[in-house]
Image (tube, rainbow, N blue to C red):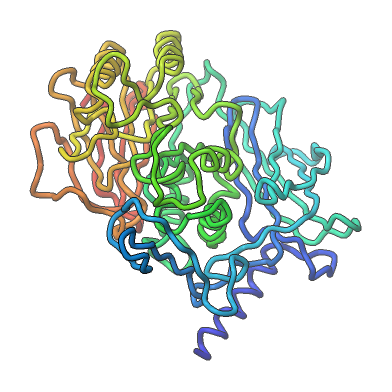
Amino acid sequence: MKNVMIKQILTGIALAILFSCQSGNIEGPWFATGIKIGEVSQTEAIVWVRLTENPERVGNDAPLPLIQYKDPETGDLIKPTGRPDYTPVVSYPEGYSIKNIQGACPGAQGRVHLKYRKLDESEWTSLEWQTVDPQKDFTTQFMLTGLDAGEAYELLVEATPLEGRNVSATMEGKFKTAPALDQESDVNFIVTTGTSYPDVDSEKGYKFYPSSLKLDPEFFVHTGDIVYYDHAGKTAELARWHWDRMYSYPNNIEYHRQVASYFIKDDHDTWMDDAYPGKETKFMGEFTWEQGMKIFPEEVPMGKLTYRTVRWGKDLQIWLVEGRNYRSQNIMEDGPEKTIWGKEQMEWFTSTVEASDATYRILISPTPVVGPDRVKKNDNHANAGFTYEGDLIRQFISQQENMYVICGDRHWQYISRDMETGVTEFSCGPGSDAHAGGWSNDKKLPEHLYLNVTGGFLEAEISRIAGEPKLIIRHFNPDGNLLNEYIAGQ
């Protein structure tokens, strides 16, 4: 216990130095959940900022809330397995609340200021001070416009209390803008999925963050299941706590302050497993689908739409799609009216793909399009329940030159090629080995070009080989060890 206390004290001192308490004001507010830089294009970026009461998270020696369920027959409080249609009851150990349980980072009122510049410039561009919004988890988002393509930028965020002008904390950041549409440029980016809190694999957060940072990526994509509300997100307050405890880990803070990100949501960070509009259950308690829809774009840098396409130079364009907002009920009979993407998004996807002249085009989907997936699943385009729309998407992609799919959701890494259309899909796999599962390495099917039930991340790179741009896909384990390499067209 003594060693734990000493460790916590030293960690607190280190974080206080990191957050640069310049004014001597030890009251805060602070940046215990860091910053996130996202939605980067040739000319724009969004910087997400949240203020906190304390300079660091509550440690992992603090307890978690107790979640029990009312037995519908006896009324007794029980802990069932799975996700039954039972009413949850949340309680806290004596002396604890949402503000001091494990990983808690209570938000704080205050104002934030942001300034930015190119790495080789001396003059800063300064934006107006903004007040964080208590109704949005004490966050605010800065829109940076008028940026130059293909440049590296640095930024500085400052915090002050509502009353007074003394800066209580600062945080530095950096990012790269996308190269111009006609610019030949090497690009590499990182993709992962499935980052549940119980499966974090180090005391500082997920190990894949520092491992992938060594590759100096242009950007990062999280395909969804960023947090898992299901078993402990029974109120909107507890749902926000899921974000706070995850993004207050040092590894997460260090990564997201210097790598631009694109966030996609899936079922677990919208509401619960296999969720869709209109789904009814007592299992999620007071936390509703509508609240989940509202919280997601407040916890990440995000524009008006959660589906979008971004061009990175002459040779790469990516499509990030929305798989929850517009979907039909999973239990609905398959046919032309059953959809995951919805009519408007489908039309947007096909029209923008056809209009693109990028050398390589990549659909990044929160769920599989090719698979194969488990027979018992019925939630994605690789499942029988969405065959009609899945066939349309696979057929369309097969007609495009140099178009591929990267998907999340599945808890194993794979490369597969659709037996009918030839579409190739890369599953990035989950963030840690503890989260891997659902398949077995001895179940390699004819579709599989690569199969590995492991955690880690995927790196996609556009690089010139003998003067020609090539797409290279690499799978890594959480420690950054290379597991497989695929070069498109070879």
Q: Which residue is drawn at 68% across and 58% down?
A: 107
Report the side of 226 relative to 158 (left or right): left
Residue 453 horizontal side relative to residue 317, left or right: left
Task: List the single residue furthest toward the right.
Answer: 164
> Height in image: 352 above or below 409?
above
Q: Is residue 218 visible?
A: no
User: In percent of the image, x 49 and y 77: which residue is there?
Assistant: 61
In this view, the residue in front, 98 or 217, is 98
Where is residue 239 drawn, in percent x and y? 52, 53
Q: Is residue 45 above or below residue 281?
A: above
**Count of marks placed on residues:** 0
Q: Which of 32 and 256 is in front in this view?
A: 32
Q: In which quarter of the image is residue 370?
A: top left
- 251 is higher (above) or lower (below) than 420: below
Identity of the residue furthest to the bottom in this view: 2
Q: In this view, does 306 lie to the left or right of 353?
A: right
Quadrant (top left, top right, bottom left, bottom right) of the C terminus: top left
| Front position in the image: 5 or 132 | 132
Horizontal and vertical percent for residue 46? 64, 36
Image coordinates for residue 16, horizontal then vertical, percent: 69, 69
Write down the quadrant of residue 415 in the picture. top left
**In the image, residue 113 lies at what x, y percent?**
79, 46
* Residue 346 appears in the rendering: yes
Q: What residue is drawn where x is 48% and y is 45%?
A: 216
| Residue 479: quarter of image | bottom left
Task: Identify the residue at image location x=62%, y=54%.
Answer: 34
